[in-house]
Image (tube, helix red, strand yellow):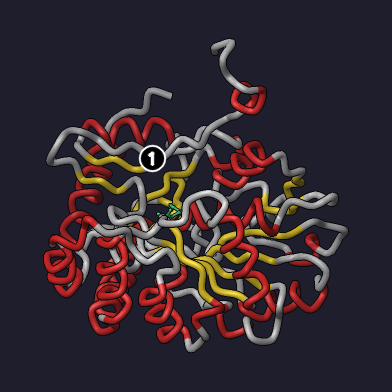
């Protein structure tokens, strides 16, 4: 606290990202990064970019990157917005499209950055409880609102929502923007991008941090009608004209173009996930259906916080959320390599054979 702080800063409750440990040799399954490196073509492109041209500003419009993204999604470049990670894209979305007189709606259990942006931009919001089985009940979103946002698959549950249900929301909610945050969509969830040309109020956000294994490069994007994209560009150009630097652009373009590598690594993650779900179920875990590169699982008798602490003693870090209390028994576990899954299962067997403290 300081007398020099503005009122806004006094009232902020900042987002707390998952731990990035300084110790090597940990099995890091806590922040949903990809266990495989980015495409070798990305590394080549980055090396070429380390050149004298770094003295020049990058393209403020990121034309080459937007064209590469548009091509992958069969859209026009004017339907693509890019930013420094999808967190930055989302920040602009909240300010440009979701701040209205009526409250913004999002699930009570979801990406915990959403209420943080509301605090930063002074946006009224209302949380809509997930059903008992943690699914999103689309009927609950049909009420006066200043916008709707949720991830598909949802985070931290990993549960996918069928495309017909998203379309049903769009058909019944034409007066405000519906944002589908598809950070994890490439791991087996159906994308809403196919609906963009039919619904001018649909905005879909993606990231290169997960399926394209570039969390360290910080690139995310939004896809939607040209009018929605123009709003985001207006906010960006009132904030930072160059969110995509020369490295980010070169690396992201190469990643978008290497479709074979992208598909191959996503499939590897999905195969490892499905095997892990079966093996954890055999250890008495209840695992929610996942369309993501992580699973959300609770043990039938053992406590989530204790399991997370015990796994850490075995050099394995997973994510545990203390609140809301409904998710406290759960662990969110990122899908790693097959070898990392084996280490996790081995550690779990030891931990579960020990007496519980709780
Ligand atoms: C649901 C969801 N959306 C968006 C993001 C932000 O991703 P990034 O800023 O790395 O693009 C995350 C990150 O974990 C996420 O879980």
Q: In this picture, is 307 found above or below 272?
A: above
Residue 285, horizontal then vertical, whole percent:
42, 51
Quarter-wise, where is residue 263 in the image? bottom left
Quarter for ligand 1? bottom left
Mark 1, Cα crowd under 10 Å, few <14 / some 14-19 / many 20+, is few
Describe residue 19's horizontal placement relative to residue 74 as left or right.
left
Q: From this viewpoint, is residue 283 visible?
A: yes
Where does the C terminus fall, quadrant-wise?
top left
Q: Secondary structure at mark 1?
A: loop
Asked if residue 353 shows in the view, the reply is no
Q: Is residue 223 above or below residue 242?
A: below
- Disc 1, ligand 1: is the CB inside 8 Å? yes
Task: Residue at 62% x, 69% y: name it.
Answer: 230
Residue 181, percent from left and from top = 55, 63
Pointer 1 residue: 18
- How many marks can you see? 1
**Residue 19 figure quarter:** top left
With respect to residue 122, does 175 lie above or below? below
Q: Quadrant of the N terminus?
A: top right
Q: Residue at x 55, y 45 (%)?
A: 113
Task: Find residue 39 and report its horizontal and vertical position in percent.
Answer: 20, 72
Looking at the picture, tell me which residue is in the foreground, 131 or 127: 127
Of residues 197 and 211, the one nearer the viewer is 197
Residue at the extreme front: 56
């Amino acid at each position: 606290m300081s007398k020099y702080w503005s009122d806004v800063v006094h009232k902020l409750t900042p987002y707390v990202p998952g731990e990035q440990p300084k110790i090597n040799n940990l099995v890091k399954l806590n922040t949903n990064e990809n266990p495989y490196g980015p495409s070798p073509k990305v590394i080549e492109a980055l090396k070429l970019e380390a050149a004298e041209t770094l003295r020049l500003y990058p393209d403020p419009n990121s034309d080459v990157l937007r064209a590469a993204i548009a091509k992958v999604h069969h859209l026009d470049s004017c339907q693509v917005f890019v930013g420094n990670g999808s967190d930055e894209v989302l920040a602009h979305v909240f300010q440009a499209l979701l701040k209205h007189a009526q409250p913004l709606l999002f699930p009570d259990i979801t990406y915990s950055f959403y209420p943080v942006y509301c605090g930063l931009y002074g946006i009224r919001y209302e949380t809509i409880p997930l059903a008992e089985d943690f699914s999103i009940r689309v009927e609950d979103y049909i009420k006066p609102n200043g916008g709707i946002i949720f991830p598909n698959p949802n985070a931290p549950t990993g549960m996918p929502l069928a495309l017909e249900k998203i379309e049903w929301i769009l058909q019944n909610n034409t007066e405000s923007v519906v944002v589908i945050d598809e950070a994890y969509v490439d791991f087996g969830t159906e994308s809403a991008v196919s609906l963009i040309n039919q619904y001018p109020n649909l905005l879909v956000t993606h990231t290169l941090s997960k399926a394209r294994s570039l969390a360290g490069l910080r690139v995310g994007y939004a896809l939607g009608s040209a009018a929605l994209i123009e709003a985001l560009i207006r906010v960006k150009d009132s904030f930072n004209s160059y969110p995509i630097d020369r490295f980010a652009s070169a690396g992201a373009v190469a990643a978008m173009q290497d479709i074979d590598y992208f598909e191959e690594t996503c499939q590897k993650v999905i195969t490892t996930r499905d095997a892990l779900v079966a093996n954890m179920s055999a250890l008495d875990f209840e695992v929610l259906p996942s369309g993501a590169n992580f699973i959300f699982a609770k043990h039938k008798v053992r406590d989530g916080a204790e399991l997370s602490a015990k796994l850490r003693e075995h050099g394995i870090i997973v994510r545990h959320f203390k609140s809301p209390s409904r998710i406290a028994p759960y662990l969110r576990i990122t899908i790693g390599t097959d070898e990392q899954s084996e280490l996790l299962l081995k550690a779990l067997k030891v931990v579960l054979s020990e007496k519980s403290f709780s």
